[in-house]
Image: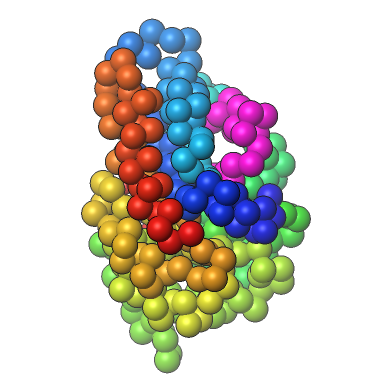
Amino acid sequence: MTTAQLVSEIKKKQSFLCIGLDVDLNKIPEHLLKEEDPIFAFNKAIIDATHHLCVAYKPNTAFYEAYGIKGWKALEKTIIYLNKNYPEIFTIADAKRGDIGNTSTMYAKAFFEDLAFDSVTVAPYMGKDSVEPFLEFKNKHTILLALTSNQGAFDFQTKQVGENELYKEVLKVSKTYKNSESLMYVVGATKAEYLAEIREIIPDSFLLVPGVGAQGGNLQEVCKFGLNSQIGLLINSSRGIIYASRGEYFAEEAALKAEAIQKEMSAFV
Ligand SMILES: O=C(O)c1cc(=O)[nH]c(=O)n1[C@@H]1O[C@H](COP(=O)(O)O)[C@@H](O)[C@H]1O
C-alpha cells in the first residue's frame, strides 16, 4: 500500500487508529477455546466488528510465535483474511527484526512476500546495512524503532551521542538511507512531549504511536505535538480494545472501545 492510499483511508474513515492483535489464549473469551483455531476465530471476530473504525491492524508476532506452528498458522490465516476481505487496511507485522544484510533480506521476504504485510517493525541498532534490505521492497514500509514507550527507552535511546540523543541520531541518519521515503518510525505515546522536536527532524514521516490505553499514553497530547498536514500518525491500542470483554459479545464491546477512540480522532482529521 502506498502512503497516499493510507492517507486517503484515514480521511475517509476519519480515523488513524491501529488495533493491535496481541492474542493471549489466557485472555480471550473461554467459549472460543473450543474452536479449532481459537486465535484466528478471535482475530476474525475482532476484525469483522472493528474494520470500519480503524485503518491498520498490528499483530505482534511474539503472541503467535509463543504458540509454535499453530500460532504461526493463525498469523498467516489472519493476514490472508485481512488482505482478501479488507484490502484497504494497512497491515503491520510487529516483529522488531534487523540483522546483517543477507539475514535482513530473508526477514523482509518472510513478512513482505510470504505473509504479504504492508510493513514490518525493525530495530535500528545494527545500522544502515541491516535496514536497507527492508527498504528495497516497493510499496512496503519499514517502521524503525526511534523512541519506544517503555521505561527502558531511557537506558540508551535518550543518551547523548555526540551532539544528539541517540533516538535523534536514528532519525537523522536513517533519512540518508537508500529508499528512506519508505521509512516510518515508532514513537511511544508515553513520550508525547518529545514529539515536537521529533517533528522538526522528520516533519513528513508517518509515526506508529503505541502506548495509549493499557500503557497510559494520552491521545490528545500525541495529536497536539505529532500531527502533520497528512495526519502522519497511526495510534495503536492493543489490550485496551481487544480485551474489552471476555463475554459472548466481546467483539461488539471491542468495537465500542474502538469507536470511542475513532470519535476522538475525527476531530483532528
Ligand atoms: O513497536 C511497537 O509496536 C511497540 C513499540 C513500543 O515502543 N511500545 C509498544 O508497546 N509497542 C507494541 O505495541 C503494543 C502495545 O500494546 P498495548 O499496550 O496492549 O496497547 C504491543 O504489541 C507492543 O509490543
Residue drawn at (38%, 65%), measured in percent from left and top?
223
Q: Is 251 situated left or right of 95 in this image?
A: left
Q: Which color mode does the image show? A: rainbow
Up the image or down, 71 lies above or below 239; here it is above
Residue drawn at (28%, 59%), measured in percent from left and top?
218
Residue 111 in view here: no
- Residue 62 coordinates in the image, percent (x, y): 43, 39
Residue drawn at (65%, 78%), measured in percent from left and top?
176
Q: Nearer the viewer, residue 31 or 70?
A: 31
Q: Which residues are magenta?
A: 75-95
Asked if residue 268 is among those painted magenta in the image, a careful observer would answer no
Q: Is 267 situated left or right of 79 in this image?
A: left
- Residue 173 coordinates in the image, percent (x, y): 57, 79
- Residue 8 coordinates in the image, percent (x, y): 63, 54
Up the image or down, 150 lies above or below 113; here it is below
Q: Is 221 situated left or right of 232 in this image?
A: left
Residue 253 in view here: yes
Residue drawn at (50%, 26%), measured in percent from left and top?
48
Residue 161, image quadrant = bottom left
Instruction: Please count the marks in the image.
Output: 0
Q: Nearer the viewer, residue 239 or 176?
A: 239
Residue 187, image quadrant = bottom left
- Residue 144 coordinates in the image, percent (x, y): 52, 62
Give the residue furthest to the front.
Answer: 267
Q: Nearer the viewer, residue 4 or 199?
A: 4
Q: Nearer the viewer, residue 207 or 249?
A: 249
Q: Is 75 situated left or right of 242 in this image?
A: right
